[in-house]
Image: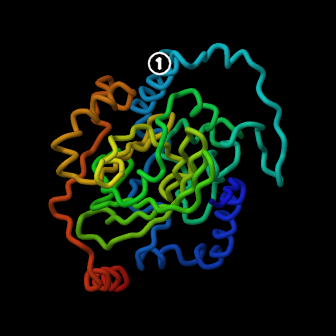
Amino acid sequence: MRHINVRYYATLHFSLLFVISPFSTVNCQFLEIFGLSTGDAGTHDRGPFQDLATQSVGLMKFLQTVQKNPDNNFAKKLKNPLPSMNLVDGVPVVPGLLGSLPGAGSCLPRGSLLIKDKSPSFFQNMLRNIPGAQDYLASLLPSPKVDVKALYGKFQWAMDTPSVHNRYCATTEFMPQAESGNSSAFSLQEKFRAGNVDAGEKVAFGYGIIHRERTYVYMQDDPCPYQIVVVGPINKQHGQYEYVILSNWARFPMIGLVRDLRKFYAEYKDQVETDLEKAGFMDDVTGSNPIHYADWSKCRKATPINYLSNVLTDLFG
């Protein structure tokens, strides 16, 4: 097994962005035309206070869950002194907190290339510049223990947040990179059509880190990490999760990934809704539905002819 160096993966991420920066800063639209997502593809252009009522309810649910968690003494944690802060290669690091490193639990810096500049979550944007804040808040909630081998493979998007995502026929594939003891690293590839089912297919990339029982998943549509907040049963035949739910401590946005859409709707949909309601991802306070169920009925497999047609349309109209 290879040893995992979290700082190495964070540094590698920024090194790759630096290498491609002369090309990307000038040619982001060019990359989009040829199918590479630059972070904004498949998302809505959001105002800073959009969905603030829904997000505020999510924050209240977060605090209620912390309060009800028997394994977490929130008041005691607040009374403890904050850990001292050091600098590692110029980056503020809170000792003992993996998430104090940008790209390894904490939000990526503003202006990261090929990454959407702002998180859809108002509250995550507020705290993203405080070292260790994301990791600290995530630590206040219980998280499922993720079997990384059961995570590998391709998922279909079955649920998302309609005010954030604008993707059709979306898939996410998790691929192994390294494992060592209680830590793992993986990469991911996303494919989707932005705006409508007939649009050209886009490809996006990301990566993830599992350290002890915390999982951080970085995608191009959010500079702050997603976490795996719910895992489904493991298929006995294939040894893979039937579904996983991604979100964050602020409970906004949310992505539901499933292996088999028909099986999910027939066997798991009701249970997932119950689990999400208990965890505070669904509510009746704001009167709006925070979950959108993807429609795959008109999705067709992408072909080279479709790809070329969409490129020519984007180039010449």
Where is residue 213 drawn, in percent x and y? 55, 38
Occupied quadrant, residue 269: top left
The colour scheme used here is rainbow
Q: Along the line of sight, which residue is nearer the eye, 182 or 252? A: 182
- Relative vertical location of residue 123 with respect to residue 265 in this rendering, above or below: above
- Relative vertical location of residue 231 with respect to residue 78 in this rendering, above or below: below
**Residue 278 vs residue 40: left or right?**
left
Where is residue 96 drawn, in percent x and y? 74, 36
User: Is residue 317 visible from the viewing direction of this image?
Assistant: no
**Residue 241 vs residue 95: left or right?**
left
Q: Which residue is mark 1?
A: 64
Disc 1 marks which amino acid?
Gln
Where is residue 189 drawn, in percent x and y? 44, 64
- Relative vertical location of residue 184 with respect to residue 12 in this rendering, above or below: above
Q: Residue at x 34, y 60 (%)?
A: 171
Q: Residue at x 70, y 55 (%)?
A: 5
- Relative vertical location of residue 260 with respect to residue 194 in this rendering, above or below: above
